[in-house]
Image (tube, rainbow, N blue to C red):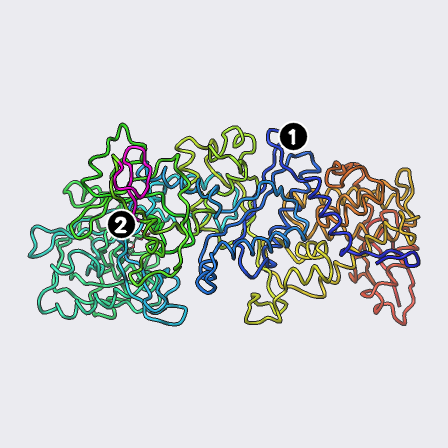
Amino acid sequence: MSTDQNPPSYEPGIIEPKWQKKWLETKAFAAKDFDKRPSCYVLETFPYPSGAGLHLGHCEGYTASDIFVRFKRTQGSNVMYTMGWDAFGLPAEQFALKTGQHPSVAVEKNVATYTKQLKSLGFSYDWDREINTTDPKYYKWTQWIFLKLFEKGLAYVDRRPVWWCPELKTVLANEEIIDGKSEVGGFPVERKFLLQWVLKITAYADSLLAGLKDVNWAESTRRMQEAWIGRSEGAEISFDIEGFPDDKLIVYTTRPDTLFGVTFMVIAPEHPLVDKLTTSANKAKVEAYVKAAASKSDLDRTELNKDKTGVFTGSYAINPASGRKAQIWVGDYALGSYGTGAIIAVPAHDERDYDFAQKHGIEIVPVIEGPNKEPLPYTGTGKMINSSKYDGMDSEVFKKKIVEDLAKIQRGKPTVNYKLRDWLFSRQRYWGEPFPILWISDADYRKIDRAKTKLVLPAANVSYSENGKIQYAVGLPFDNLPLKLPEVDNYKPSDTGESPLAHATTWVNVYLNITTGETHDNPQCQNCVPARRETNTMPQWAGSCWYYLRYIDPHNSSQLIAPEKEKYWGMPQLYINGAEHAVLHLLYARFWHHFLFDIGVLTHREPFPRVVHQGIVLGEDNQKMAKSRPDFVVLPDTVIKEYGADTLRLYLMFMGPLEDMKPWSSKGIEGVHRFLRRSFREIIGEDGKISAKIKEGPETNAETEKLLHATIKKVSADIENLRFNTAISALMILLNQLQAASSISLQTASSYVQLLAPFAPHLGEELWEKLGGEGSVGEAPWPSFDESKLVSSTVKIVVQVNGKLRAELELPTNVDETKAVEAAKANEKVKPHLEGKTIRKVVFVKGRLLNLVVG
Ligand code: ANZ
């Protein structure tokens, strides 16, 4: 704390809260709809407010976008920069299970902590646009989008196998199961068939692929998303089966050119023909195999290094091209869920098939010869061999030709497949958005007058049947949303895998007026039928699929987003997030966005034109920070307490390129803290007033002037390109020059503060105020640079000793011979070569070379 006796020092603990308060009070960062300035919308991933609070990863990404928007404001943009909470999810529900308190209690507490932490970092959000996915006013629109998907036939139900862990009483994701046991606790899991909601994302596969052509994303991310969608062009080929004249075995292949090399077939354990094709001699073996396969995940089954297992059914397929017989095996490396669930196996040209054939002693017939007669399996292209009349043909030509020829005899057709699967959209959980759906009987469904009802009915009926009774899904009227999540006493999923909402029997069982869509508990009501609410909830992804749209119009109760506002703000011109979002979040959100575009809600087809992934901040030991190694976990709060938020921000950006993985360093943070202290000291004098070194009038030091212009140019370009670390280096070099100069102009000092301000906004405001700057430094127009002042002020001079290159010196452009010799003598690399010797001759080429002849 400064007193009258002591010169003031840099005290972030005082400066920072002061400016944070001021920014909040003046609503300094309000985004103004329809303002004349150009709009600039920047998005960052809204956090899941966990009990652990904000971590360094959040701070890194958020600081980067905050610098970017602060820079944009000074350039005259009307910035929209926002924050919200992705607050549905398992941990809040588990908190409820443990404490008996409603999950919203945990959410509220955590949101308060996060808010405080984010404010303490000085992020320039428009807090009036804050959103929370668990707020009924928000999830009303999540439900609305779902209802639209339902109405358009893009949501359906299916009895799907899910992994169920009886011990944990929960459904688990594929990734949570290792070797048939739960990752947590190692308990056995079983397949359970539960009724699930599924969204038809596959209908958007081509649209999602096409859109990737127009985005400015990291190449690796674009490719990952492409691979996830996995468009594959191939052919379906139909095989006769010996002894089963009424059946065909249809396979999907991307290599019809290998057809003459087929020596066996593999069908998935789930394939509908397994039982039929298994001869009695093989029955026991096949049944045991099929049973064992049921507990493996697709991931386990297709893992390349896994042993390729299988059993022979005893039946044979007949190759439509060669007429040869091929054994039909059941093997779990053929997946039931891809293509047709059956494949041709060509050991000569496919690694998996090769391993399998070797292991089971099956014949290997090469049909493509590579240019260098490569060893098997050979997966490249070449000349056809062992393929009857096609021998000698180029394999790429043959690939098309054979499909055409097979098509003529109805044995084949070109086919496109996708890796992308429809999206399993329901969870047996409490803490999620309820589905605005009710189930009614077949007879009651038929009573609905489609012309009169306000219920939402899908183009194609959505139904399921249980014990011979058919149930139909109807959607609540759009006007009746939100359907609020009911209070329950018991948050546990039940033994049957049913969602905890099923316990809320009075909420679940209602009477539905099939005209008005109203629900109540009065059985007497006319037009009413008994109905049962859907008790699954939506997955965590739902709320985050469209949140970036809601910031544009967060309080609109009659529309998801007003079209004029969507037009004005457009889509976020920058979205910084973690690389873990490369597929799921960015794909799901794009799907909903394309859909909303198609139904006329939006005018922009792609939501995220520019996506950048921040790199992970590692611990000082170069490992991922983890609770298990608490000594290496750095918490933002602790750093802020010790050094202040400006230091934390600056250091996170100085550590290295934004997208790189980089380790924390306590030395490094000391360094940037010193830099901020030096900046403070350079502007503010001993008496607490503006430093005596700072003079009115134009800059008189030519070196300073040149460097200032070069720094303005560099920092501006670096911020635009998110190269914050090099921008900060440039500021450090400029500060060195300011310190070395005997005086600085007020203009230079002000420009320096402006350049520093996006990175260290609190210190920026403080120094700006001291310099007598007008208003907030965040609003002052960004300094401009003069290209003509950038002419380099230094040259590289090559130093030779007896003609041998010894060093390169950076010296002022107009350096003379004497000064150059002096500099060379002082240089560490040159010194040893002069020791004990006399300079006999000096050759100096101005601005280029210095040769010292010694002896
Ligand atoms: C014969 C063949 C020969 C194949 C060859 C490959 C190489 P993508 O690009 O992934 O679509 N396949 C087809 N359906 C399958 C299923 N349900 N489970 C496991 N594998 C399946 O690859 C398609 C290839 O993967 C197909 O082409 C098929 O093997 C296999 F030298 O057919 B191929």
Residue 480 image position (x, y, % from top left): 39, 37
State which quarter of the image contains the N terminus.
bottom right
Mark 2 vs mark 1: give the one in front.
2
**Taking 560 as reference, is 324 above or below it?**
below
Placement of the C terminus among the 4 image quadrants: bottom right
The reply, left or right, for residue 686 in relation to residue 805 is right
Q: State the residue at coordinates (20%, 54%).
A: 260
Look at label 1 and name its amino acid: Arg
Which element carries disc 1, helix, strand or loop?
loop
Residue 706 figure quarter: top right
Sequence-wise, the earlier of marks 2 and 1 is 1
Q: Is residue 589 above or below residue 358?
A: above
| Residue nearer the viewer, 330 or 182 | 182
Magenta segment boundaries in residue numbering: 509-525
Residue 627 is at least partly visible in this image: yes
The crowding category of the residue bearing disc 1, from other C-alpha atoms within 10 Å (few below 14, some 14 to 19, many at least 20), is few
Sort mark 2 into few (<14), some (14-19) or many (20+) by Cα contacts within 10 Å: some
Left or right, 363 with respect to 800, comes to: left
> Measured from the top left, where is residue 428 in percent x and y?
35, 56
Q: Secondary structure at mark 2?
A: strand
To which quarter of the image does residue 397 belong? top left
Query: In terms of depth relative to the viewer, which is nearer, 484 or 314?
Result: 484
Amino acid type at mark 2: Asp
Task: Give the Cα separation between the discs numbered 2 and 1.
Answer: 50 Å
Relative to 298, 487 lies left or right = right
Q: Where is mark 2, residue-wise?
A: 158
Residue 845 in view of the camera: no
